[in-house]
Image: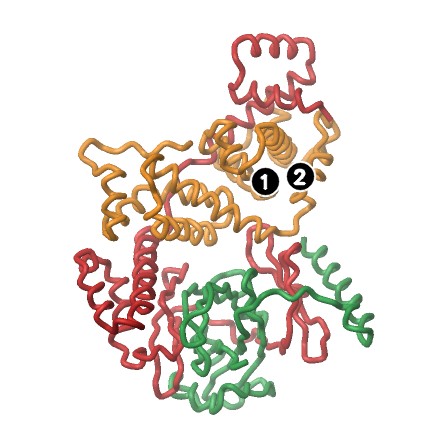
Amino acid sequence: MKPILTALFLVICTALASAQGEPPSVVSSVKHATEGHVWGALIFATNDATQLTGAKEPIHADLPRLNERLAKVFPFKHFEILGQHRQDIFREYESWVVPSRDLFMKIDSKGPADKGGVNLHLQVWREQQVLVKSDAVLRKDSPLFIGGPPWKEGRLIFVLCLERK
Amino acid sequence: MKPPSEEHDLIRWIDGEMNETEIATFEERLKQDPVLAKEARQMRELSTSLRTHLPAEMRVPHADYFNTQIEVRITQMALDEARAKQASPGLGAMFQWLRQPWFALAGTAALAVLGFFLLNPATGDASESMIISSYTPNTHVQARTYHDSAADATVLILDGLDAVPAERKVSGINIQRSEVEPELASTTMFDSHGTPVLMISRDALGNPMITPRG
Amino acid sequence: MPASASTDPGEVSDLDLVKRSQAGDTRAFDVLVTRYRGRIYAMTYHLIQNETEAWDLAQEAFIKAWRALPTFKHDAGFYTWLYRIAHNVSYDWLRKKKIQGDGEFDDERTEHRVAVGAEATPKGDLAPDAAMTNAELGQRIQQAIAKLSPEHRQVIVLREVEGLAYEEIAALIPCSLGTVMSRLFYARKKLQEQLHDVYETSI
């Protein structure tokens, strides 16, 4: 199965790469109904600056003072965004938020909630193992901080927020 | 390929769906046709094995939690309805609902959810994100959730997770867009330049599979 | 249709529990969940072949049932009604999540690939029947079922696990009687092909 998928992926990559620069219709993709958009990030928290990986991912504009806010919850001095992912929340299909291959999230929409929120079923995965499943309501300007596994002398944190638009 | 009628006869014979005359006729055919007879016997044996090895009832993992979660979700639905009604007659309707005798008997988990809604002052205007319920398949892992007003964030802490080995190089990706392919049950992820970075799909057991592995 | 679980003489009947549930008594519904969760989970598990998802879908079925309780008319047994909900929830999921397989999800293609009476099935190097323990055979069967298309898996579970009559399967899916029989035939052929080393040597 894996070689087939790898080959398929390469075929898609080739097709899309060759289509770049051509009219949009060439790479037309079906637009699926969405409930909104999320931003997910994998963050490494540590007290030892020498352990930082050097990643330079920018902080999302909807999350001002992110490091300060993380420090209110997690007892670390340094917070580094390792990876990030902007994702549609599909109404009919599962949505994956993959800021890293090491820790990622599956989202299933359960429809809109009040105050502009969205009802979600979340699953945090570590490779092929599901760490937690949650039913949640995600609202704008109110991120979700998920304290994940320890790494080195720090901790991996998953941040999820509903984008304003 | 056999004609459909022959396939159907074979199936009906295996499943005991033939009357006596049909059975006699079919079994006479089996005597005349050793290939069909062999196939019929093998298929019947397979059918017997399936019935033996596919139990009609199974032990539900974390059975108590299974029930509790259902109760939590039911309570949550009732709360949502009460909230909707609350919009016009005010809090009275909600508290009227809470006075229902059966509610007093609801499970502790359901009460925990209710407590989250009622006791957390910030939920009065329900403007923040909420974790309604959590389930950790690994029983050594505990999930706890709360709202941190100083951080202005909803927090879900997973305690008891195995550490990621220090020597492992955990690295991130920057994904800006994705395209879902329903027929393949896969999603292709693109970076800010529109270049495909990875594809995620499911393996035969339904677990996520990221390609390429990176 | 699947019959309800036999109840002890002193046990509260499904009907009483359903009436109390319809009046909003979650305790009564909890008893129904406990009574039928093992059977509903078995069905979702056999259909989905994934413990985590099957657990979720079984739960989803009970929640849907709770929501639909006001429409339950008592003209069918509660378990039959619940089973139908669970089946629909699972099958919808299966269709939605159709996984790319080895052409397994196309009945036409599958049927052509498994031409009846094909003698040229490759011989595997797996242990023959005599050496295979009961547990090993069970595992092989589960693996073989996981490779079936949703449509084939569905008829196998409905017939072999639940023991439904062809007419009941046709009504539940829904499809014609002929389709039920054809699907059952090809599903079994497919399983037979995958388990050929077991059955080739056993007769």
Work out which quarter of the rendered image holds the C terminus of chain B and state it: bottom right
Q: Label 2 is placed on what type of residue? A: Asp
Quick check: can you spot residue B133? Answer: yes
Q: Position of residue B121 (x, y in %)?
A: 27, 81
Label 2: chain?
Answer: C
In the displayed structure, B38 sits above or below C19; it is: above
- Residues C50 and A119: in front is A119
Q: Which mark is residue A35?
A: none
Q: What residue appears at the point 79 percent right and 66 percent down from the top-left corner? A: A15
Of all residues shown, which one is farthest toward the front? B88
Residue A26's x, y, as percent? 79, 68
Q: Colour of chain B?
A: red
Q: Nearer the viewer, residue B147 or C29?
A: C29
Q: Secondary structure at mark 1?
A: helix
Q: Identify by letter the chain in green.
A: A
**Mark 1 sits on what residue?**
C151
Q: Are marks 2 and 1 in contact (CB under 8 Å)?
A: yes
Crowding near the residue tagged with mark 2, few <14, some 14–19, many ≥20 C-alpha atoms within 10 Å? some
Determine the chain carrying the residue at label 1: C
Q: Say yes or no: labels 2 and 1 on the same chain.
A: yes
Chain shown orange: that is C
Residue C107: mark in rendering: 2
Q: Residue at x 57, y 73 (%)?
A: B168
Q: Whole-percent x and y of residue B55?
A: 43, 36
Q: Secondary structure at mark 2?
A: helix
| B190 to the left or right of C135 | right
Relative placement, left or right, of B187 versus B158 is right
Q: Position of residue C115 (x, y in %)?
A: 72, 30
- Dot 2 or dot 1: first in sequence order is 2
Residue type at mark 1? Glu
